[in-house]
Image (cartoon, grey):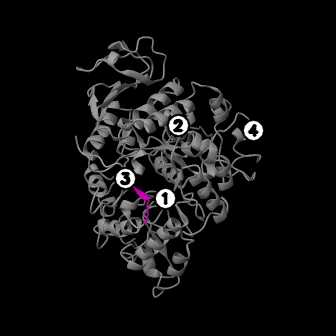
Amino acid sequence: MAEITKKWYKEMSVYQIWTRSFCDSNGDGIGDLPGVYSKLDYIKSLGVDGIWFSPIYPSPNCDYGYDISDYKNINPEFGTLDDFKKILDAAHGLGMRVFMDLVVNHTSTEHMWFKEACKSKDNPYHDYYIWRKGRGNKPPNNWLSVFEGGAWEYNKNLDEYYLHVFAKGQPDLNMDNPKVREEVKSIMRFWLDMGVDGFREDVITFISKAEGLPNGFPLPLATGIEHYKHGPHLEEYLDEFRQVLNEYDCFAVGEGPMTGLKDAVNYCTEGPGQKLDMLISFDHMNADCFMADWVKLPFSLRRLKSTFDKWQTEMYGKGWNSLYIENHDHARIIERYGSIKFRVQSGKMLATMYMLQCGTPFIYQGQEIGMTNVRVDHVTEYKDVMTFNNYRLFKKLGFTEKMFLNLSFKVNRENARTPVQWTGGKNAGFTTADEAWFKINPNYTEINVEAAEKDENSLLNYYRKLIKFRKEHEVAVYGDFKQYYRSSGSLFVYERNYEGKKLLVINSFSENPVKFDAPAGIDLSAGELVLQNYEVLNPGKNSFMTKPYETRVYLFS
C-alpha cells in the first residue's frame, strides 16, 4: 500500500457558503454575514471542520462576487470587515477553520487598477491587464469568452482591446507582470494575517496565457482555452504563491476547469515542488453531460465510476482529492444523479457514495437537506450572466423560451443559488423582506431545515451520522480504493482498506431491484453494518435485492 501522510486538511469536512442566498439578517432580501453568524451553531452541528466562503468582497455583481472591485474589504451588501472578523473568531472558537475564495485570474472593471489602466497606455496599471491592438476592425484573436461572446472588449479611448475570458466586467489580469503577482501575494497575506486558514483558488489554472496569444481551435463554447488552461508559466506562478502559503499553517485547493488527472497529480503530489493541496476537478460532474453542464446527455453510472476510479487510484499516495457533488456552479445533484421520487433515499446514497471515498468532502449549503432545482416562468426571472449568454446561444440553435426553460431547469447553476430553506414559514425563514433577491423554491414548505431537524431519519441527520463516522474511522479518510461491479450500470461498489480495517460501500443508482452478491472473499456476516438508508433485517446475508437507491456501508476489523 502507498504510504499516506496524515494532515489536518485531509481529515476535515468543509461547508460551502454562498452568502447572498444563505441567511438574511436585516430584511433587505439578501443574505449577509450577520445571517451566517446566526447559523454558526447549526453549521457546527453538522460536524464539519471548516467553512469556505464564496467571494464576499466588494463587487458590482456582474458575476455575483467573482468580479471583485476591492480584494481587502467586504461587500457592503453582506456587512463589514468587523462582521467577518466576528465570524472568524466565533468559528475558530467552535473548532472550525475559515477559507476564502481567491479570485485572481481577473478583477472587476470597477477595480481601481482597471480604472487606472483605462486612463492611458502609460499608466503604471495599464500593464496589470492584457491589452492588444485589433486586427483591422476585428479583435486581436478568435478567442471566445465563457460567459459573453468574444473574449475581447474594445476601449475607444485607448484604441485597444482588453481580454476577458469570462464576462466583459471581468478583465483578465496580466500575471506575467511581476507587480501583479506581488499584489496577489499581498492579498493572500492580508487575509492569512487576519487568521483565515486558506483559500479556494478560482480558475487558478487559467492565470498564464500562451505567448503571442495565438488563435484557438474553434470550439463552440471556449475557443482559445487550449492557450490558457495550462499556460507556459502556470507552474512557476503557483510555486511563487505556494511560498506565501508555506509561511502559514493553511491550505489551498485550486479550481481547475478541464484540468486532467495527469496535471492534477503534478500540481498536488506532496513534497518539494507541491503547488496545491487539492484540485477541484470537474470530470465526475460530466456523467450526464458533455464537457459543459448545458450539453445534456443521459446519466451514465459507468462514466461516473470510471472517473472516480481513475482519480482515486492515481492520486492515492501521491496527492489528495477534493470530494464534492454540489457547489455554486452546478444544478442540484438529486435531479442529476439521483431521483426526485426517492429524494431522501437517493440523497443519502449520493452522500455515502462520494463522502466515503478518499479525499476531503465539501458540502454545499442546502445539499444537506436535499434542496432541489427550481422552475421559473420567464428567462427574465434569472439573474446570472451565464444564463443570459446561454439563452442567446440556444435561441440561435432554434430553441424557444419554453424549450430553454425546460433545459435550464435541469442544468442551470442558478438552481444552486436559490435561498436556503430554513423553515416552512414566510420566505422559507430566509428573509423577513416581502421577497428575496431570487426566487425561493416553492417546495420549502416540505423541504426545510426545521422539518429535517424533527425527523430522525431525515437526510440532514444522515449527513451528521456520515460526517461523524468519517471523523471516527481513519479507514474512511486514509484507506485505499478498490472498485467492484465495474461493468454494472446500476451498482457502484467499492472497498477501502487501512491498517487492518476495511470498508465495503454499496450504492444502488436504480429505483428497480438489483441483485447484489458479495464480492469473492468478502463475508458480510463478518462485518458490521454501520450506515444504511433502509432498515435491514438480515445484514449478514451475502446476496440480496437492493431497494430503490439503497446504500449500505459495512465495517470489517
Left or right for 302, reference 124: left
Q: Residues within 10 Å of mark 2 (few under 14, many from 20)?
A: few
Give the alpha-carbon distance from disc 4 to disc 1, as whole Å: 36 Å
Q: Nearer the viewer, residue 408 or 264?
A: 264
- Whether pointer 2 and pointer 4 mark residues with C-beta atoms closer than 8 Å, the reply is no
Q: Which residue is mark 1?
A: 197
Q: Residues within 10 Å of mark 1 (few under 14, many from 20)?
A: many
Among the 4 quarters of the image, the one containing residue 132: bottom left
Q: Which mark is residue 406?
A: 2
Q: Which range of residues does the magenta coloring cover?
A: 248-255
Left or right for 136, reference 42: left
Q: Nearer the viewer, residue 553 or 59?
A: 553
Residue 488 at what x, y percent from top left?
A: 29, 24
Nearer the N terminus, badge 4 or badge 3? Answer: 3
Q: Residue at x 71, y 33 (%)?
A: 424
Q: Which residue is mark 4?
A: 426
Give the alpha-carbon distance from disc 4 to disc 3, as whole Å: 40 Å
Q: Residues within 10 Å of mark 4 (few under 14, many from 20)?
A: some
- Whether pointer 4 and pointer 1 mark residues with C-beta atoms closer than 8 Å, the reply is no
Give the alpha-carbon distance from disc 1 to disc 2, as whole Å: 41 Å
Residue type indicated by callout 2 = Asn
Nearer the observer: mark 4 or 3; the answer is: 3
